[in-house]
Image (tube, rainbow, N blue to C red):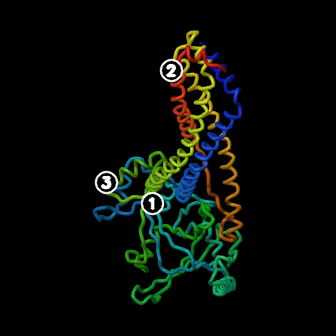
Amino acid sequence: MRFKDQVHFIRRNMKKNRLRVFMTVLATTMACAFLVVLSSVGFGIQKTITDITMSQQIVTEINVLGQENGKAVKKSDLEKYKNVKSVVERTQVYEPNKATLGNRTNEDSAIVLTNMKDEVKANMELDRGRVAKSENEIVVGYNFAKNLWTKKEADEYNKELKDHQDNVSDVEKPTGYTEDLLNKTIQLSISKTNNDTGKTEGTKTYDFKVVGITKKPSQEWMEDTNIFISDQFKKDFSKFLDLKGGNAEKSIKVYADKFDNVEQLTNDLSDDGYKVMSVTTELQGVNTFFLVFKIGLIFVGFIAVLISAIGIFNTMTMAVTERTQEIGIMKAIGASPSIIRRMFLMESAYIGILGSVIGIIISYGVSFAVNLAVPVILKAVGGKTGAEDLHYTFSYIPLSLVVIAVVICAGVAVISGMNPARKATKTNVLTALRREL
């Protein structure tokens, strides 16, 4: 019996009781859709966290927190590692400072001393302008200009905060400086405070030219108001400020030449006793957690597929009973038991695959609707909570999930049809031929 004839025979028999086959396929479809949609939540949340993590920092950046033996981290030692593009050492100054441009001031910035040449090697991301080349040039954060307020704007904003202490999120900040800040000269006043008394012991003012503005933060709620100054000023600042005390903090970041080498470079540094943190180390824990989470969701969906398998088993059992005489005729004309078994297994597999395909199509529709509707619902419920800026993926169906769903549904369907198929092969020819229709 040719394979083409077997397929034709299967299709003809399935058409004899379309309603029963339809209900069985429907049950499989619903089970498959439930499995995919439920699991897609886990994949969606993982994708969201991964995307946020990747967007919040440069993917080739490795933050060196120290050494396990307590030794100081030396920049020269880190530069010797393979696949290192640049090592950037930054010193953040925590002393009070005030940046002035005309009648506007910004008292909410952090001063960062860094080597501009190393920043260029590390591809410092700029929205516009360039990296500082001389000691009197600086690069400021993307939100620096927005925090340049007049005294009137600052007083009104502070008054609004005082009047709305219960819900400060309703208070809007002043627009700040709206003109182009590039090539403007600002006066930066830095104060020295006594760590014991907290009193100001002196103030020094510098003139700096803004030549670059950093790239806009990846998330709307993030602000970058840093002031990046060449570390050529470190000697001058050291005469005035205590950069080795608690008013300054040094950080060292290693930048790999490309993202593919980040994991290997991270492992090399970790093996040599460095305490490091990178995108790969952050995502490793996230991926482990979500692997377990997704397995749990797939298992719950698998239970629904097992329930639908009962319907497939009943359908195939009824099919064998109804076709007893046909089975006897096929045996009488020389059909082998393997062919008969294969035909019934193909029929049950057809039901499983058809149900899974339809279920996956429905799942994509549900996933699209969820990603479209949930942000709107959260925005309506949350009001001014930033819901309008949500860029989260609540449901995501990767190709791997589609393959898993098809394999599970088709596999369960075939297993459900094995017993009826085995029963068909054991049918007695004489008994089957004597049976009345």
Relative image position of residue 171 (x, y in whole percent):
67, 79
Q: Nearer the viewer, residue 176 or 240?
A: 176
* Front in this rendered view, residue 428 or 331: 428
SS state under label 1: strand
Marks 2/3: CA–CA distance? 68 Å
Residues at discs 2 and 3 in contact (Cβ within 8 Å): no
* Identity, as a three-letter code, of the amino acid under mark 3: Asp
**Res. 374 image quadrant:** bottom right
Seen as rendered, the residue at the extreme top is 333
What residue sits 28% from the left and 62% below the top?
69
Q: How crowded is mark 2: few (under 14 residues within 10 Å), some or many (20 or more)?
A: few
Q: Quadrant of the image for the N terminus?
A: top right
Which residue is depicted at the point 64% across and 23% down? 10
| Nearer to us: label 2 or label 1 | 2
Q: Which quadrant of the rendered structure holds the C terminus?
A: top right
- x and y percent of residue 168 in the render? 63, 79
Q: Neighbour class for label 3 at 10 Å: few (<14), some, many (≥20)?
A: few
Q: Mark 1 points at which residue?
A: 88
Location of mark 2 (residue):
426
Q: How many marks?
A: 3
Q: How far apart are marks 2 and 1 (CA)?
A: 77 Å
Query: What residue did someone put label 3 on?
Result: 272
Foreground: disc 1 or disc 3: 3
The residue sitting at 58% across, 41% down in the picture is: 308
Indicate left or right for 433 with 238 as reference: right
Three-letter amino acid code of the residue under disc 1: Val
Circle 1 crowding by C-alpha within 10 Å: few under 14, some 14–19, many from 20: many
CA gap, disc 1 to disc 3?
19 Å
Marks 2 and 1 close (CB-CB < 8 Å):
no
Q: Is residue 427 left or right of 170 when viewed as pictured?
A: left
Depth check: 33 or 282 in front? 33
